[in-house]
């Protein structure tokens, strides 16, 4: 596989293919953090004012990636590898997507 999901320390590497593959999970698990961040950005366009909310959203997404990798390593690596190879074209990775979602169903 040309891309990795985690680094040598086991921390997620949030490449586009990793994030696209896990997008549905991140959407569900990090909804409140992302909504709070977007509300903050809408309320105050000064980026400095929303750093804490942004960190919370990022921390949540990285936590989801780490959890998915620990629970579904092989199907996640296959899906991410397909997405990387096919430049994030979902239609070309449906088989890998199905295997990943069967192994790690959306909660």
Image: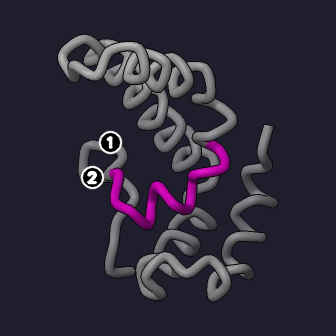
Q: Determine whether label 2 and label 1 are within 8 Å by CB.
A: yes
Q: Magenta stretch containing residue 78, yes or no?
A: no
Residue drawn at 56 percent across, 61 percent down:
21
The dot on residue 11 is 1
**36 or 43: nearer the viewer:** 43
Assign a secondary structure to mark 2.
Answer: loop
Name the image quarter holding the C terminus: top right
Residue stretch rendered in magenta on the structure: 14-25
Q: Magenta stretch containing residue 20, yes or no?
A: yes
Q: Decide if residue 73 is on the left or right side of residue 56.
A: right
For disc 2, the marked residue is 7
The percent coordinates of residue 94 (x first, y second) are: 72, 79
Q: Quadrant of residue 16?
A: bottom left
The percent coordinates of residue 74 (x first, y second) are: 58, 65
Q: Is residue 14 above or below residue 9?
A: below
Give how far apart the Cα atoms at labels 2 and 1 are: 5 Å
Decide: few, some or many residues near mark 2? Use Cα within 10 Å; few <14, some 14-19, many ≥20: few
The percent coordinates of residue 89 (x first, y second) are: 55, 81
Q: Quadrant of residue 35?
A: top right
């Amino acid at each position: 596989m040309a891309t990795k999901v985690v680094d040598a320390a086991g921390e997620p590497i949030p490449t586009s293919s990793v994030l696209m593959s896990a997008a549905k999970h991140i959407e569900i698990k990090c909804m409140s953090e992302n909504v709070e961040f977007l509300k903050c950005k809408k309320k105050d366009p000064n980026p400095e004012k929303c750093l804490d909310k942004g960190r919370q959203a990022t921390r949540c997404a990285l936590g989801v990636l780490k959890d998915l990798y620990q629970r579904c390593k092989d199907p996640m690596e296959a899906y991410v590898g397909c997405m990387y190879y096919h430049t994030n074209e979902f239609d070309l990775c449906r088989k890998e997507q199905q295997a990943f979602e069967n192994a790690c169903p959306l909660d």
